Image (cartoon, grey):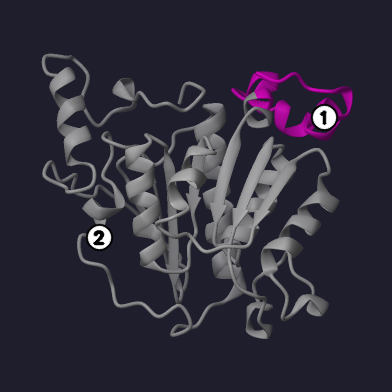
Amino acid sequence: MLQLTAKELERYRRQIMLSGFGEAGQKRLKSSTILVTGVGGLGGTAALYLAVAGVGRLILVRGGELRLDDMNRQILMTDDWVGKPRVFKAKETLEEINPDVQIDAICEYVTPENVDALVQSADLVLDCAHNFIERDLLNVACVRWNKPMVEAAMNDMEAYLTTIVPGQTPCLSCIFPEKPDWDKRGFGVLGAVSGTLACLTALEAIKLITGIGKPLLSQLLTMDLATFDFAKRRPYHDPNCPVCGDKYREILEKNVGSDSVFSSTKVLTTNFPISL
């Protein structure tokens, strides 16, 4: 793992003080690369909290220009940037906040042509994409390349969050075998709602990287922020899922006869560079 400079030790001193975090956790953050898709009210805010936490490298992916109706929630943006590619402003803002973090800005949408290279370049993926076409592409690529993915989405005042580990937790196709009819501009959005989910998404990524706390493995956190009703649900893991079924059966066969429950973290093994 990469070593911490004197400046970094001071910058992150308060989180290094956390029980179970320490300098080892900070080094893991510095040594990690996270791909963030979407870079809007959800992805951009999550990227902000990952940058200030000291993640070593962030890859921001989002095509298109900033619109005026984005400004009620996209906290990395400024009014003078309306009409310009938002991902470059996100990079500029994050670098001003923490110049020690490497920020790569890619002004593209997630496509069949670029998804594999994007996923392979990261240790962990944050799926904050603005439609299920991109989300499905990311899900398939993460399963293909054994990359953990934090899945987060919101609609109106509701939101959900989960972590997908290929072959060991339900993938997005297991959770949503039929995709909802969803128009990215067809629902209302309050900045505080996307920001709340974004903070939880960043926290989930930090937990996965550092080992602090307990991540949402095989659990779907649902939130109704109009009523503050939170619930953890256990989604069905389809052994015949066309996306992750083969990996699921392979790992299940390896653990036959084990004393560990299959869905527990005791049998969690991925290509992620640290122990989850």
> Under tag 2, what secondary structure?
loop
| Neighbours of disc 1 within 10 Å: few (<14), some (14-19), many (20+) | some
Where on the picture, by quarter, is residue 144?
top left
**166 horizontally vs 150: left or right:** left
Can residue 255 be seen here? The reply is no
Range of magenta residues = 1-27
Residue type pointed to by label 2: Phe
Residue located farthest toward the front when viewing the structure as drawn: 113
- Whether residue 17 is in magenta: the answer is yes
Residue behind mark 1:
8
In the image, is residue 56 above or below residue 83?
A: above
Residue type pointed to by label 1: Glu
Identified at 42% across, 38% down, the residue is 148
Q: Quadrant of the N terminus?
A: top right
Residue behind mark 2:
176
**189 horizontally vs 75: left or right:** left
**228 horizontally vs 210: left or right:** left
Q: Quadrant of the C terminus?
A: top left
The front one of 29 and 106 is 106
| Neighbours of disc 2 within 10 Å: few (<14), some (14-19), many (20+) | some
